[in-house]
Image: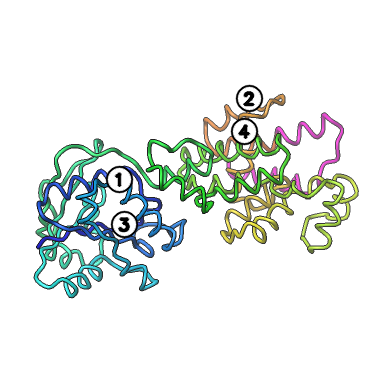
Amino acid sequence: MSLIVFGGSFDPPHRGHLRLLRAALRAVEGSRAAVVPAFRSPLKASCRASVEDRLALLRAALDEGLPGKLRERVSTEAFEARRGQMTYTYETLRFLKRRHPGVELHFLAGSDAAADLARWKNPREVAGAVSFLVGKRPDSRIPGRPPFGARFLALPGSFPKISSTKIRLRLMLERPVKRLLPRSVLALVKARGLYGLEILRRLESELKPGRYAHTLAVARHAAALAKRFGIDPERAALAGLLHDCGRAVEAGRMAAFARRKGLRVPAFEETAARQPMLLHAHISEFRARTIYGVSDFEILSAVRKHTLGDAVMSAFDRLLYAADASSPDRAYAGVGRIRDALREGLDEGFAESVRSKIAGIIEGGRWLHPSTAAVWDAALEHL
């Protein structure tokens, strides 16, 4: 008997996964397949959906995406999920060998994953335990001499470059994904509010339509800038979505809210008296943490600093500050200069964002917050 082992995060499972699995089942006649969702992948960031959610999504994908006879040959294996901890491929293979003595094991992988074999734990053991069924993507190649004596069998055809990361980002930014996900998977994602959809629903219900549109514009802009500057687009998008979530608190109640929650805002009393709307960034950070469940320090820092800034601004902080100042929905004088500066680099774009904000405040005769000078100094430090 031959058993095809198909491991991965499946966060979420998509049409590319199904196409690869169908090709493998047809290439190895009479084989069965065990699809093994990772609790957490050793070579990737933490999964965005729980392993329970991903198992449900995976079963829906298999039911919809495999013809009846192929579906009968496939099962989901919850070994890694039951362990509740990071599990390496060699450990899963040992388990499957004990469960299926004498079975011939094949490991199904895309060409990018197969090329990373040297980074796996105990790669020689893995290479000796399985033969690899490799699906080639258009922009990748299968090593001519696989490392560690591994046996690579290229599956017929070429496989689309579909990324779960890209799908999650598109879902978070309200971009269409119908061509990438099976219908049943998308329906389940929506029903469970996964991959940012619950956040979007709440923001849309709490914010005024114009503010929600701005929020989405900033999130999309932040993600695009993050990709350009080598920063995680998913985390940038989430920071963009939550940067104004404090606006759900009415302007007239912001000072009382911030005082009640003990928020540490620079020059709080003067800010509350002169321009309480400036408190919204600290309120947004508080609500992102307590209402939306965000614990990522960098995201919370960027949300808190996107209005008043700070004497210390990380690259992530500067990215959100500039994304908010230059989002596509902005039309004030000087925004074009910020966009031009961002084409030169993040530091240039951040500095121009601060300069433009200071100029606008002075020209409008508005109160200049005491922390603004420190933000300008921070901007100059990065040039």
Furthest residue toward bottom: 98
Asked where in the image residue 80 lies, by quadrant, the reply is bottom left
Q: Nearer the viewer, mark 3 or mark 4?
A: 3
Q: Number of labelled discs? A: 4
Amino acid type of the residue that numbered disc 2 sits on in the rendered structure: Gly
Q: Is residue 42 left or right of residue 2?
A: right
Question: Which residue is the site of mark 1?
Answer: 65
Amino acid type of the residue that numbered disc 1 sits on in the rendered structure: Gly
Q: Secondary structure at mark 1?
A: helix
Alpha-carbon span between mark 2 and mark 3: 43 Å
Q: Are marks 2 and 3 in contact (CB under 8 Å)?
A: no
Q: Secondary structure at mark 4?
A: loop
Q: Secondary structure at mark 3?
A: strand
Task: Please state which of residues 377 and 273 is positioned toward the viewer in this rendering.
Answer: 273
Main SS of residues in magenta: helix
Q: Which mark is residue 186?
A: none
Label located before the other in sequence (1 or 3) = 3
Alpha-carbon span between mark 3 and mark 4: 36 Å
Alpha-carbon span between mark 2 and mark 1: 47 Å
Q: Residue at x 82, y 51 (%)?
A: 254
Q: Nearer the viewer, mark 2 or mark 3?
A: 3
Q: Residue at x 74, y 46 (%)?
A: 247
Label located before the other in sequence (2 or 3) = 3
Question: Which residue is the site of mark 4?
Answer: 327
Furthest residue toward right: 273
Q: Are marks 2 and 1 in contact (CB under 8 Å)?
A: no
The magenta span reads 356-383
Amino acid type of the residue that numbered disc 3 sits on in the rendered structure: Gly
How dense is the environment of label 2, judged by Cα within 10 Å: few (below 14), some, or many (20 and up)?
A: few
Question: Which residue is the site of mark 2?
Answer: 336
Question: Which residue is the site of mark 3?
Answer: 8
Q: Are marks 1 and 3 in contact (CB under 8 Å)?
A: no
